[in-house]
Image: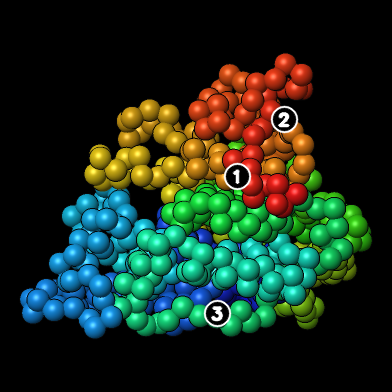
Amino acid sequence: MTLEKFKEEPWRTSHAAYQDSVLAMSPAPEYASSEVILSSLYRHVGLEGASERTVPQRGRDLDREVQRYRDRARKPGDAALDADTFHMLLHSVLESPKLPNQSSKRFVQVTPLVPQAAVFSGSARLSSNSWPAGALVRRMVWLGSPDAAAAASTWQALFAALSITDEDDIFARFLQAEIEAWSPQPAWAPTDTGEYSTLDPADQDGLDYPARRFVRDLHAIIGAKDSMTRRQWTSLLEAIVRLAAVAHVTWLCDVHARSWDCVRAALDGNGPADAAAARAAIYPCAFQFLSYGDRALPAIKDRASAFLQARLGLNATLWALHAEGTEIASLSSAAAVADVCERVRANASGLEARGIRDILAEVNERETRTLLCKKGIGSNIMEFARHVLGQRQAANPVLRGYDQGFALRKRGTSNSSPWVVGLGPVSVLALVHCSLAGTTGPRSVRRLTQHLAGYGAIVDYRDIATNDLGHQLRMLGLVLDSPDAESGMLLVPPFQAQQEETA
């Protein structure tokens, strides 16, 4: 790959220093629903061999196998249900609502209540080229942990929590055993996590970012498992994962844009001179991208567009330095960005001679639709954010209330109604629980707003008494109105016994 080849195909191949960076957006997000992410997470945690590529075909194979048993009025030896009943279980009891554009398609899509269900259901696409959404969550765990050992420990704790044990409710145990009887391979077992990188310790110090908040909340959600049924717990986990995943992707967009600002300034002879200055420049100290009650997608689109411009700028600069004989090994830390800025300043005349600014201007003009998120990577990011955060729009009107863990809701009933920030009841339960995890004594609703801010969601605690979030908190019994509290409302732990145990 050379600078000229980059100019011809700017999205095809990234420079190794960019591609292998800890802060690279890898895997690149595409369409996914919250249940797709949870299903893919099962496959990455403990279903080795059940790759995204194999899921659609396994679903079709299972449907055919069940039909053959129905025709012969038989069932597998270890199965408790006959073929007709198991078919009804898959296509009625456990069926997850299809989107309006999927209503006429026949495929297996079930709620990811137990691990074995993810063997044949829950891929992003019905073809064999789905992206690995679970790998994004795995990367978040490593990026949000202080070191590799802590990340591996969290991953093992997640595997144990997702496993079906004697402590799970009887329906979950029955369901896992029954699906295993009909679809036994691959079996549920820990997968090899391999080697993954964490954020540079110097950059982590004092930095609050979505992946770090997610790892803490993940432990809180795991700790609450014994307080509820399997279905309730997986709903809480799903609610936290979907908010954290979009927040993480949007935060990465911000970091990319800020990193490019530093390198672009270096082209003019400026930019950070050392790691400390680079750290202050590239990591947002007050990250926010959602404002409660306001439209959400325009802000995400702006950040996705800035990310794409940064990706072009960073790769163009790296390839231009490569042409100058200067090799860059990494963009994984503030110190690495500071080093790139120093190399850019040292090679300023050579970069100018190669016309890097003109190349970028030409590529930006040619790739306008992609940069505006009309197609390609930017469009995929928007699809990801909209479907992961937004309430499921079911084709069957009876199932419109199926999704209660959303973070975006329609302002009206029209298809053209805007998506606004508004938490579903399950999201509220999950966030209140996580915000109170490890605390003792009463806390005001301000603590909840501070917790939401860790994911880039902003809500004024003084507005909670009158907005729909306050209404949700009251309906769920999660607040006590108190004239002595700063905001007049005190949070009530949703799982009191577990909360006291944690504290």
Inspect the image, locate mark 2, and give the three-letter code of the amino acid beneath it: Ser
Residue at the far top in the pictured view: 483
**Quadrant of the rendered image containing residue 416:** top left
What residue does disc 2 label?
Answer: 444
**Quadrant of the rendered image containing residue 179:** bottom left
Inspect the image, locate mark 1, and give the three-letter code of the amino acid beneath it: Phe
30 to 372, vertically: above or below: below
Q: Decide which of tag 2 and tag 1 comes sooner along the chain.
A: 2
Q: Is residue 173 visible?
A: yes
What residue does disc 3 label?
Answer: 190
Quick check: marks 3 and 1 in contact, CB under 8 Å?
no
Inspect the image, locate mark 3, and give the three-letter code of the amino acid beneath it: Pro
For the point 66% across and 32% down, the residue is: 491
Mark 2 or 1, closer to the camera: 1
Residue 327 is marked as none
Quick check: marks 2 and 1 in contact, CB under 8 Å?
no
